[in-house]
Image (cartoon, rainbow, N blue to C red):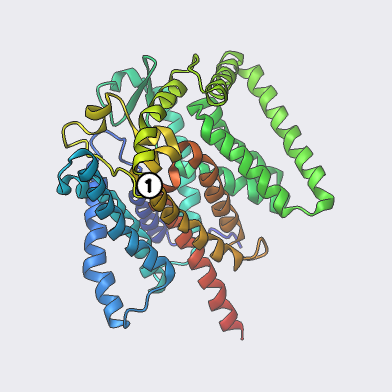
Amino acid sequence: MNKFENINKKTIALISIFFLLTFSSFKYVPGLFFTAEIWILYNILFIALIFIPEKIRDNFLFNRLEIYILFLIVYVPLTSAIQSSSEFGQPLIFGLLAQRGIFVTGSSLILLHFYRKGYFVIRDIEYSLVFLAWLNLIACSLGLLFLDPEQFSDVPTFVTQETDIAKFKFSTEFIVFGFFYYAFSGFWLKSKTKSFLSLFFLSFYIFGSGTRTIIISLFITYLLLVIKWSSMRKVFTRVTTVMLTLSTYVFIFYLIDSDKFNHLIEKFIAAFQVVFTGQLGDDSSANARILEGYLALPFVIKNWFLGNGLVSNQWNGGFNSIFDYFYPVDIGLLGMIFIYGVLGAIIFCYQFKLAINYIYLLPNYGDENSNLISALKGVLLSCVISSVASGQFINYIEQDLILISILYCATFDIIKRKIKCN
């Protein structure tokens, strides 16, 4: 029987919309930014009108993931508002509103709520994420091929300007999932077809976006997990196979478009020169990050424990009115410590403690949800690696918590099946 025969298309569609809203996939699309604000409001209403009353009826029975999310929703806005008011004089109300996005972490509570109610199963989540991976890949690829970013240069939420070159801002999180889903499915099943399909997702970042941080994190993550899942006897063979495959892929890339290949290599070299020498080079993007790092460092040292808080763009123009040009997200982990301090960074890191707890209870392979679980492991590990440069595990914590919530549901699913068998 074809495993796709019993798909509930309505359920898949609803889950897909849920993920698109939680991942703020429409935030860069002209005219659709309001969807992010609507989703924040929906999360607030869900927590206040459904989640909290339900917990009261259950005698305040929370799991650790739920407690963590509620703690973040209270701690992050309050601490950030107080610190930004103390350091920059920003009114508390602006500080609180600047952190309203933290309420989207409530999406994990929504997922857990409807999973417990039996409205969907883990396989529905898998189908939805695979569907979104292909949809994300096709939509972004078509956008790069047939749209001219210069025509949208007056829409800053959709296009960014780098060294006088306009580039689209695309949400590509599901493409990362697609790469790991097919790469690891191919690894476990020894399927050349699935391994080949993973190259479509990898190609987007190499031929399309050229995002160095993501390319490096994808490669390192895949290599680390392949080594971890391989026996000592097979490590050398599998790593050699990966390296030969990658070398062949790079050679084909060079033959197809040598100019683009050379440009990408030059970007990597320029970035590494700036990082390892600490001096400005030919890469304007890397140079900007070095300069922003110098701006942030005195404030990081001054308020290292609790941070300096987030300044709203709606208050006197935000950080740019204070530093001329400054975006904390540009300097990755340093920027996140600038906002939240060392204590905040540690609190945000706790999400991975939860993830490890759930992963420990899940088999590497052999379970019916193994392809999904392996992909989620890859996405989360790549997030850890890329966060050094991007601060993703803090800046987009709602995305990580959704994936961790799925791992929680997967462990719950295994326990239910064991009880049923007994």
206 left or right, relative to 115: right
Image quarter in which the C terminus is found: bottom right
232 left or right, relative to 7: right
Q: Quadrant of residue 50?
A: bottom left
**Amino acid at pointer 1:** Gly
The residue positioned 61% from the left and 44% from the top of the image is 221
Image quarter in which the N terminus is found: bottom right
User: Could you say where residue 314 lies in the image, as x and y percent from the top left?
Assistant: 17, 37
- Residue 161 visible to an observer of this rendering: yes
User: Could you say where residue 244 lies in the image, as x and y percent from the top left?
Assistant: 76, 33
User: Could you say where residue 409 lies in the image, as x and y percent from the top left?
Assistant: 48, 67
Q: Residues within 10 Å of mark 1 (few under 14, many from 20)?
A: many
- Residue 6 visible to an observer of this rendering: no
Q: Secondary structure at mark 1?
A: helix
Furthest residue toward right: 233
User: Could you say where residue 13 lies in the image, as x and y percent from the top left?
Assistant: 38, 55
Q: Is residue 111 above or below residue 340?
A: below
The residue positioned 35% from the left and 47% from the top of the image is 340
Residue at label 1?
341
